[in-house]
Every structure is written in structure tokens, then in C-alpha cells.
Amino acid sequence: MSFSSSSFAIQRQRMVKEQLVPRRIDDPATLEAMGTVPRHRFVEDAMQSRAYGDHPLPIGSGQTISQPYIVALMTQAMQIKGTERVLEIGTGSGYQAAILSRMCERVYTIERIDGLLGKARRVFDQLHYYNISSRIDDGTTGWKDEAPFDAILVTAGGPEIPQPLVEQLADPGRMVIPVGDREVQNLQLLEKNEGEVTVQTIEHVRFVNLVGRHGWDD
């Protein structure tokens, strides 16, 4: 079954109304981005009919595109105002980076799997999302040459918060990251303000593993 652009637009608005708003996603910029970015473009053609469902989807290489609610929850927690430079660890499908790109000045995104980043880059170009910079690297070491970042978002779960990311976070700055074991994590919000770092748990989540020098072994 094929779907028209208008059909996908209707599904997007239903996703916002039925999945996000009832779960206290109320930041206007987050809701606008979630209702605008074509999520179906970031999954395989065979998965497009399920793109706006209330669940994650596989994208290949053992990775997933996160459930829409989780994408919105993490985005809202960063309190983006529009002028920020944001670092994302784990490009994956590219959907989260695309959401962020509609809300901030520039997104820097790192992926360790070449094939996934290649696909994401093609979609960014097709959608004319030109304020996204990307690279293949170990995301747990950050992107030192472009630091500091006003906000950092990590889309994979690690055993601890990587210290290089804390160091590359601006002051003031906010980082959202899942931390825990390989099965279940706590989604944590780290805030840096006047040299002080505080961490609070937002929600229990389940993400793919954060692989790298400051994460899990491959």
C-alpha cells in the first residue's frame, strides 16, 4: 500500500495529538518540529506505513529509530530556544537530528556506522536540512574541535555519562542521556551551571548500546 504526502501529514498530526500531547509534551517548538519533519522518510520503504506508530522501528545494523514520544521527550528536556549549537551522539536514521535542526542554529551529529550515516545524509539533503554537520567517529569522545555545545543529546544507553561530553558541554548547558545497563536505562538530564553539575532522572527507557571508548565494548 502506498501513501500520499497528505496522508502522511494527517498521520503526523494524529501522532502529535494522540501520542505526545496526552503525555505532557507541551513545548510549542518540539510539537511544531514533530508535526513537520516527515518521519516516514527516515525508515525503509517497507516500514513507512508504520512510521507514525507509537513504537520504535528497526533501521538496520542492529539499530532503531526511537518511538516518537521518546524523541519528543528528549528534545523537550533540552529546552532549545533557537540559537543553540547542539551535539547529537548516535545519528542512526537521522530523524532526531532532523527534529533538532528545525529548532536550533546548528546540529553536529556523530555516528559510528558508515552505512547508517550515508542514508541519513541523503535524506537531509533531499529535505534541504542544511544546518546539520555529521561525521563518522566514536561519539563517546565528542567533537572537540567544535566544542563547546549549548546542548548535547545521546541516543544510545551507556554505563555512565562520558566525561568528554561533560567537558564539551557549555556552561550553562544541558545534556540528555540514557544511563544504565545493557537492558534498561534511566533517561538522565545533566545540567551545568556556573561550574556546578547536577543530574536528575526523567524516565526509565530502553535504548541500543552506546558503543565506544567511554561506553560499552562492541
Image: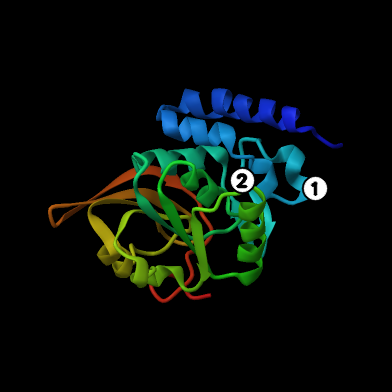
Displayed quadrant of residue 154:
bottom left
Q: Image point 69% across, 49% down: which residue?
A: 43
Residue type marked 1: Ala
Q: Is residue 203 above or below residue 215?
A: above
Q: Residue 148 versus residue 179: which sits nearer the camera?
A: 148
> Measuring 32% from the left and 45% from the top, which residue is drawn there?
201
Q: Which residue is mark 1?
A: 46
| Tag 2: amino acid | Pro
The x, y position of residue 178, in whole percent, is: 41, 54
The tag on residue 118 is: none
SS under mark 2? loop
**Foreground pick, 161 / 139:** 139
Which callout, 1 or 2, points to the residue nearer the camera?
1
Residue 157 picture location, percent across and down: 45, 59
Q: Residue furthest right?
A: 1
Residue 190 on image: x %, y %? 28, 51
Q: Which residue occupies 34% across, 45% down?
A: 83
Instruction: Look at mark 2 in the image and give the residue it sits on.
Output: 56
In the rendered image, the quadrant that contains the N terminus is top right
